[in-house]
Amino acid sequence: MRDLLGVPPGERLGLDAYREDFRGRDFAVAGCDSWKLERRQHFREPGDASWNAFARGDWEGALRLIEAQRAELRALSRLAARHRCRLLRIRVVEQRLTPYLQWELHLLRVRAQCGELIRVISPQHIAAYERDGAVPELVTLNDDTVYEILYDEEGVLEGAVRYLGARTRDRIVARVEELYVLGEDIGTFFDREVAHLMPPTGV
């Protein structure tokens, strides 16, 4: 899938520049869905209160803080709906679940309940795209923007490469949408694979 990002060249943005650029483009073009593809099985999110609770071993506190985000997440979905924009996400999930992913799947379940459209796929679904390495973490925004999200070795967000152009965006969306069709709804996946698990240990 990385070959689709090659033309035109992307521009690397540091963390602050990426956040500023994203905010400036968010829902600027009505009627354009936003897609997200997540591949990595471990991240670190020190800016997230729920992740911080999880990281220090307070699982119940982490879940309470996820629940506390419902109003904010519903507001985001309502804002997207006013712009006729759907928020769609594909989450690649490997078995056995990493502690991080167990935490994130609780968050994704709540996000879906608040209006996001989220499906889970296995690594087998993307095997054809990974002959030369893992697929990148991707976000599309509006009708002409793709971000390849960048993380350091520990999984902490450090910025993005921004690709501009409707053709690049459309090619990426076409591939990601193919994967989305193959995926399982986050709700049914969660009920079967996650709900019964004991609290994770470690980060």
Image: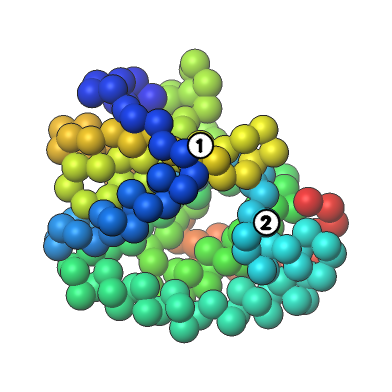
- The disc, 2 or 1, on the residue closer to the chain's N-terminal end is 2
Task: Estimate how packed mark 1 is, as few (under 14), some (14 to 19) or many (20 or more) residues with alpha carbons within 10 Å.
Answer: many
Label 2 sits on what residue type?
Answer: Pro
Q: Quadrant of residue 57?
A: bottom right
Tell me the residue at 26%/54% (across/down). 25
* Horizontal arrangement in the rendering, residue 113 relative to residue 123 (left or right): left
Left or right of 71: which side holds 53? right
Q: Is residue 70 left or right of residue 176?
A: right
Q: CA distance from mark 2 to mark 1?
A: 16 Å
- Residue highlighted by disc 1: 150
Q: Residue at x 58, y 66 (%)?
A: 107
What residue sits right under mark 2 in the picture? 46
Instruction: Kindly tell me whether residue 122 is visible in this rendering.
Output: no
How many marks on residues? Answer: 2
Mark 1 is on which residue type? Leu
* Near-viewer residue (146 or 197): 146
Q: Residue 79 in the image: state x and y as whole percent.
A: 28, 74
Where is 101 relative to 103, above or below? above
Q: Say above or below: 68 vs 130.
A: below
x then y, percent, for residue 143: 17, 47
Residue closer to the observer: 4 or 112: 4
